[in-house]
């Protein structure tokens, strides 16, 4: 049985984790009460190994969204655009995403790059994702490019920071000050 966890550390602290479970029906039924004690959402993804594969699919999207967010906000900073207004516009269009709307205001945009999900771990996951895609003959050029973005951040000392700190790494690469929300700005 495998049961990787999804969502943020703050969700886990509140018992609101999401579990992606790979198990036989019998093992899933037996483990469900234990998982329910730790989380609010439990998905039976299929036989053993399916939970881990689902986690790779989830992290593929989450990590790549962070790399795209980092580039977009660095560009916004270079353009001299107000961060709060930029976020307001992005959240009002289909460009919005959970990382930018939920995680980033509580982490990097608040100046907190302490490890939640480290860039080093995101790099490991994208390596697993690219390798899995290669094994299945599914080309993943965006994942490969994202992994190299993470490689660049790691080479410059950002590996132990939260993966939202990709914004700081992108700004460092572009010789820009990292954008931060004004104190008291509500998340999202």
Image (spheres, rainbow, N blue to C red):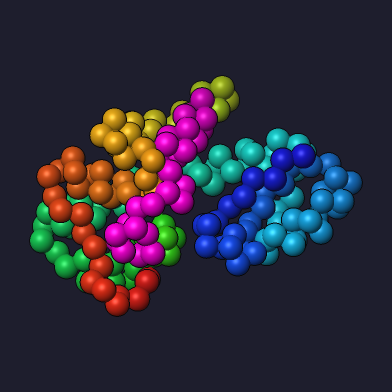
User: Taking 81 as reference, is 115 left or right?
Assistant: right
Q: Is residue 71 magenta?
A: no
- Judge whether 151 appears above or below 68 on screen: above
Q: Residue at x 60, y 67 (%)?
A: 14
User: Taking 76 as reference, is 119 left or right?
Assistant: right
Q: Nearer the viewer, residue 110 or 52?
A: 110
Q: Nearer the viewer, residue 185 or 43?
A: 185
The percent position of residue 121, horizontal first and vertical second, equals: 47, 38
The stretch in magenta equals 105-131
The C terminus: image quadrant? bottom left
Q: Main secondary structure of the magenta part?
A: helix
Q: Residue at x 30, y 75 (%)?
A: 185
The percent position of residue 59, horizontal first and vertical second, equals: 51, 44
Q: In this rendering, does residue 92 appear at all?
A: yes
Q: In this rendering, does residue 149 appear at all?
A: no
User: Taking 173 as reference, is 117 left or right?
Assistant: right
């Amino acid at each position: 049985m495998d049961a990787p966890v999804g969502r943020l550390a703050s969700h886990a602290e509140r018992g609101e984790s999401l579990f992606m479970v790979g198990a036989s029906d019998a093992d899933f039924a037996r483990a469900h009460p234990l998982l329910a004690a730790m989380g609010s959402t439990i998905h039976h993804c299929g036989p053993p190994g399916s939970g881990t594969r689902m986690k790779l699919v989830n992290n593929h999207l989450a990590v790549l969204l962070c790399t795209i967010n980092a580039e977009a906000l660095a560009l916004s900073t270079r353009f001299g655009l107000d961060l709060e207004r930029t976020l307001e516009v992005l959240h009002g269009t289909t460009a919005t995403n959970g990382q930018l709307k939920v995680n980033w205001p509580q982490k990097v945009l608040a100046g907190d790059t302490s490890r939640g999900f480290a860039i080093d771990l995101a790099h490991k996951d994208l390596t697993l994702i690219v390798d899995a895609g290669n094994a299945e003959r599914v080309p993943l050029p965006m994942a490969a490019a994202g992994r190299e973005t993470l490689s660049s951040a790691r080479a410059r000392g950002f590996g132990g920071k939260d993966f939202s700190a990709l914004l700081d790494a992108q700004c460092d690469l572009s010789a820009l000050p990292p954008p931060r929300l004004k104190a008291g700005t509500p998340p999202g």
